Image (spheres, coloured by chain):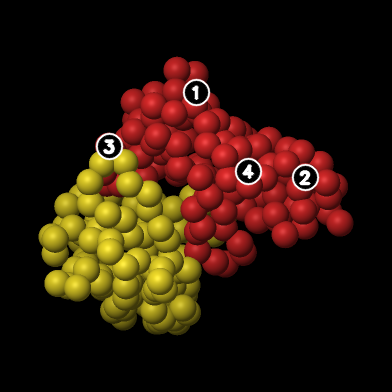
Amino acid sequence: KQEVTQIPAALSVPEGENLVLNCSFTDSAIYNLQWFRQDPGKGLTSLLLIQSSQREQTSGRLNASLDKSSGRSTLYIAASQPGDSATYLCAVDPSGSNYQLIWGAGTKLIIKP
Amino acid sequence: DAGVTQSPTHLIKTRGQQVTLRCSPKSGHDTVSWYQQALGQGPQFIFQYYEEEERQRGNFPDRFSGHQFPNYSSELNVNALLLGDSALYLCASSLGGMNTEAFFGQGTRLTVV
């Protein structure tokens, strides 16, 4: 059974720092992995999608990497800003057809001005 | 492009009542998935609709049912509401096929009292 874990559960850093969020999964048989952002009480915003054949994806100050063999993904945020404060979730797609995304519980990020 | 829209945004119901939540997918998308997110947790997959049929279902009781219309919009119905059904209900749309990105609506916050 696929399980997704995100550590740490919460993280607080000063503005301007570079930071890394971690996501691990137990079964390497995945088709893709997505990183999402969720603001309090709100829905989810897709940040990056990495196909299983890819090693990383970049969007602006965000860079996500994927190592299927070790069951790990990282989300790197460069030059953090207070507006980056949110909960970041990762989800793996085991079937390739969005049948059932399997989610981590998220990392709550606070960027202090 | 309005993206994925959900209605209503907030809802309060009494135990035992029935509720219907609605979702309009992103333009061009034909697949709708529903998720339940309890406070502080990652989303849990309820079911997915494609071509007006339930294609896959998560571990939810039959009290949870759905429908997809010819225009690809979808409804989630929950009967005999329990206090434990209180959660954020998220709708995601995607384009049927392999390895496609899921886009989420802002969610419906359901409170059962």
Q: CA distance from mark 2 to mark 1?
A: 24 Å
Q: Are marks 3 and 1 on the same chain?
A: yes
N-terminal of the two: label 3 or label 2?
2
Q: Are marks 1 and 4 on the same chain?
A: yes
Q: CA distance from mark 4 to mark 2?
A: 10 Å
- What residue is pinned by disc 2? A79
Q: Are dots 3 and 1 in contact, CB under 8 Å?
A: no
- What residue is pinned by disc 4? A62
Q: Quadrant of residue B71?
A: bottom left
Q: Residue drawn 14% across and 64% down?
A: B52
Q: Residue drawn 44% across and 23% down?
A: A68
Q: Is residue B83 above or below residue A24?
A: below
Circle 3: element type: loop
N-terminal of the two: label 1 or label 4?
4
- What residue is pinned by disc 1? A67
Q: CA distance from mark 3 to mark 1?
A: 18 Å
Q: Are dots 1 and 4 in contact, CB under 8 Å?
A: no
Chain letter corresponding to the colour yellow: B
N-terminal of the two: label 3 or label 1?
1
Q: Position of residue B68 (x, y in %)?
A: 19, 68
Q: Which amino acid type corresponds to the residue marked 1 in the rendered image?
A: Asp
Q: Are marks 4 and 2 on the same chain?
A: yes
Q: Are dots 3 and 4 in contact, CB under 8 Å?
A: no
N-terminal of the two: label 4 or label 2?
4
Q: Tag on residue A95?
A: 3
Q: Position of residue A19 (x, y in %)?
A: 73, 38
